[in-house]
Amino acid sequence: MSKIVLIVDDDRAVRDALAQTLELEGLRPVLAGSFIEAKDHISAEFDGAVLSDMRMPGRDGFHLLAHARGVDPELPVILLTGEGDIPMAVKAMGEGAFDFLEKPCAPEALLAVLRRALTTRALVLENRALKAEALAGDAAARMIFGTSQKAEDLRSRVRKLARLDVEALVTGPRGAGIAKVAEVVHLSSRRRGGPFVRRQSSALDVAGFEAALHDAAEGTLFLDEIDTLPASLQYSMAERLDAGLATRLIAGCSGDLQEVVEAGRFNAELFYRLEGMSLRIPALSERPEDIPVIFQHYVRQAAEQAGLVSPEISPDTLSALMAQDWPGNTRSLMSAAMRFVLGMADTVGNAGDLGLAEQMARVERSLLIAALGRQNGKASAAAEALKLPRKTFYDKLARYDIKPDDYRR
């Protein structure tokens, strides 16, 4: 989510008070005392929202709204109105304002509107970036993984792995899109002109493996669930890799392949050949901030496939989505999007029916897990990133039965 809020108000005391409220919530206020000061910050690339007083000397909030709409019609502008300005604010909504708030407004009401505006802005900029990078031919940019640091790190890792024409291992939880990421590695590599052939490991024998190599010649062979590869084939594959292949081999695994090796059920030599170049797809529970971006994409996709108008996604729906663990990851989120488009009751509605405390608890748990994932399971670093005292952080981990060691890579 974007965090920058441009505050425009000619009253310095009001500006400072608003800035303090935002800073306490981890947002980044940028202050301007007039339209003239504010306009230099407003651009199509502005990564945030605008919060402006309606009545200001000279050029007022209406003028600022018109200017912002001219620069970028999708830039959210929220207007602060006095008691007598509400009819004007309603008129401003008709002219494209994102929302309006009556002064004095409670901090929780202000923050709720700002979060909604910032989430909307992040989605807009994400979609623009994806379109621009897709036109530039960057297959990794087209992966709909969100805007979090984990998502960006995954894209970067895909690009690096694509440049190395060696065997590789892609891991992640079930439903995370392991096969799709492997295909993007192929499409980002020099082998993109060759075929991408996918085979289920458990169904292969030596003859089937040789046939698959032939089918994927000069391209990439992806072996799904490599931990189910028959033992007789594991040794043959290790020998073939030592001899060199004309085909690139990428393996996928949703379990812990090292545990399978330690249990004596997988060839250690083959494992180390694959594991040397690997990437892991983080679960949605580790990056809940990506859920709104991914869900919106799937809703548009599902509506197009069904020949329906894409329904509006409310902030409450997004909050309900972020409050869930999604053990099926992007696969189950895609199914939820299809049901949402078809108007069918599903887990999104169930989460929305929960009380506020339970929804907030689910979101808090997801954010704790996400912080641990970003810090490689290091609790002290995660507590610092969340700006929480260590004791408070550990108390929350105990409350939700979260173990930092589970998030070490």
Image: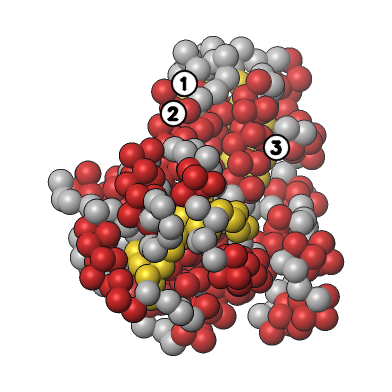
The crowding category of the residue bearing disc 2, from other C-alpha atoms within 10 Å (few below 14, some 14 to 19, many at least 20), is some
The crowding category of the residue bearing disc 1, from other C-alpha atoms within 10 Å (few below 14, some 14 to 19, many at least 20), is few
Q: Amino acid at mark 2?
A: Ala
Q: Amino acid at mark 3?
A: Ser
Upstream in the sequence, badge 2 or badge 3? 2
- Give left or right: position of 337 versus 218: left
- Give left or right: position of 154 versus 317: right
Say if mark 2 contacts mark 3, CB within 8 Å. Answer: no
Say which element carries label 3.
strand
Residue 181 location in percent, x, y? 53, 37
Say if mark 1 contacts mark 2, CB within 8 Å. Answer: yes
Residue found at x 47% / y 39%: 43
Foreground of the two, 182 or 347: 347
On residue 278, which mark appears? 3
Residue to which mark 1 is pinned: 136
Residue 169 visible = no
Q: Quadrant of residue 100?
A: bottom left
Q: Quadrant of residue 73?
A: top left
